[in-house]
Image (tube, rainbow, N blue to C red):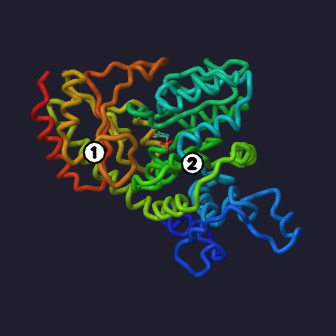
Amino acid sequence: MSDKKPTHPDTKLVQSGRRKEWLRGMVNVPVSRTSTVLFESIEQMHAGYPPEDGRLSYGRNGTWTQWSLAEALTELEPGAAGTRLFPSGSAAVAIALTSVLSPGDELLMVDSAYGPTRLFCDRELKRLGISTRYYDPLATPEELAALLSDNTRAIFMESPGSLTFEVQNVPGICAMAKERGLTTLLDNTWATSFFFLAIEKGVDLSIVACTKYVSGHSDLMMGAVTAAPSHFERLSRTGRSFGQYVSPDDAYLAARGLRTLGVRLRQHELGAVKVAHWLKDQPQVALILHPAFDECPGHEHWRRDFSGSSGLFSFALKGGDEAARDRLVDSLELFGIGYSWGGFESLAVPADVDQLRTAARRQYPGPLVRLHIGLEDPDDLIADLATALADYPAS
Ligand SMILES: Cc1ncc(COP(=O)(O)O)c(C=O)c1O
């Protein structure tokens, strides 16, 4: 590959991480499996330490297969110092938080965070003497500043929020945090750095569950944290200390997914916007919670900060109850019922959030359904939804 760094995201997706010495004549960086690395001499063995990406030392520290993926993810984020890979998105969240918090610290956590992220705070961080306070995802930077205590060390954002899709004012919150010496973390899984440049917007630690769009094929679990220069060393040290590692086979698959992230995301976007527009006109539907729709809370932040929208959104039904909503989801034929999202296939799940929120409970006109719009023809998905909605009780 040439030394001139590409600047456009699509070109970066194709070129990044493909160093000549790692490709060794092939198009893709091959899978290199190992635990032991053999050295020519003790001197060479010592030269492998301390471990760092690009220097063979021991299997847990990776080979070119993992380094190449990490480098490609870093290059997608202008201003980033590096990326660490983790065996799941949740592991990435847990280690990123652990890398910045110490006993006695307080964390401000967005109320619309992914459920297991909340559980990690409420159980594990609590056990370590770190307290968590939840805040409304629509809080302005000023409102958030008013919540800070002397012990607040970090602010965690997830934008848009899980299930309810509130879009946060990430640049505003980061600027406020920076003035006060606080660390900012963002779960950027919905947009990925293809649609939202987290580090450039001021985020210190940007987390992506590669399980979703980076992999894109619902066949692996992985997480990544991309860090600003101020936070990369500590993140790396914590990840290594906790023995975090991803297999070269998974890294290869994730890198293969990454090469087509741009075309897939744009196709997910087209399909999701089309389905959401159709849903908006249906008499059984009350509200579309899709960041690109002006009725979605925080839509103005999406319009200002994002370069696109992905395939995941929710809608609120008009009236009816959870049982009727569940029957509707059960009756869909082209949508799978299952956790996760970001693969090529469409999914539908009931989205019940009351139990998951403590700082900002919003009222919705009826039960919520979350859809992941895959790469099928949206007209087929619309026909499937039309059949299911026809049986939904009119309010
Ligand atoms: C927004 C978000 N963040 C993080 C995760 C965790 O990723 P993983 O399932 O790879 O642990 C998920 C999983 O659904 C998610 O939706």
Q: CA distance from mark 2 to mark 1?
A: 25 Å
Give the quarter of the image for residue 275.
top left
Check residue 87 in the rendering and tell me which mark sits there, or answer none: 2
Q: Is residue 209 left or right of residue 103?
A: left
Q: Is residue 281 left or right of residue 223?
A: left
Residue found at x 57% / y 34%: 172
Q: Are marks 2 and 1 in contact (CB under 8 Å)?
A: no
How packed mark 1 is, by other alpha carbons closer than 10 Å (few <14, some 14-19, many 20 or more), is some
Q: Secondary structure at mark 1?
A: loop
Residue found at x 47% / y 49%: 211
Q: Secondary structure at mark 2?
A: loop
Whole-percent x and y of residue 31?
Answer: 57, 68
Q: How many numbered discs sit on the rendered protein?
A: 2
Check residue 38 in the rendering and tell me which mark sits there, or answer none: none
Which image quarter holds the N terminus?
bottom right
Say whether disc 2 or disc 1 marks the residue closer to the N-terminus.
2
Q: Amino acid at mark 2?
A: Pro
Check residue 336 in the rendering and tell me which mark sits there, or answer none: 1
Question: Can the viewer see residue 8?
Answer: no
Which image quarter holds the C terminus?
top left
Whole-percent x and y of residue 16?
Answer: 57, 66
Q: Is residue 162 left or right of residue 188?
A: left
Nearer to me, 101 or 159? 101
Whole-percent x and y of residue 269?
Answer: 34, 51
Is the residue at mark 1 in contact range of ligand 1, meaning its CB lies under 8 Å from it? no
Residue found at x 52% / y 51%: 193
Nearer to me, 208 or 159? 208
Nearer to me, 50 or 134? 50
Q: Amino acid at mark 1?
A: Gly
Whole-percent x and y of residue 321?
Answer: 22, 21
Which residue is the extreme one toward the right?
43
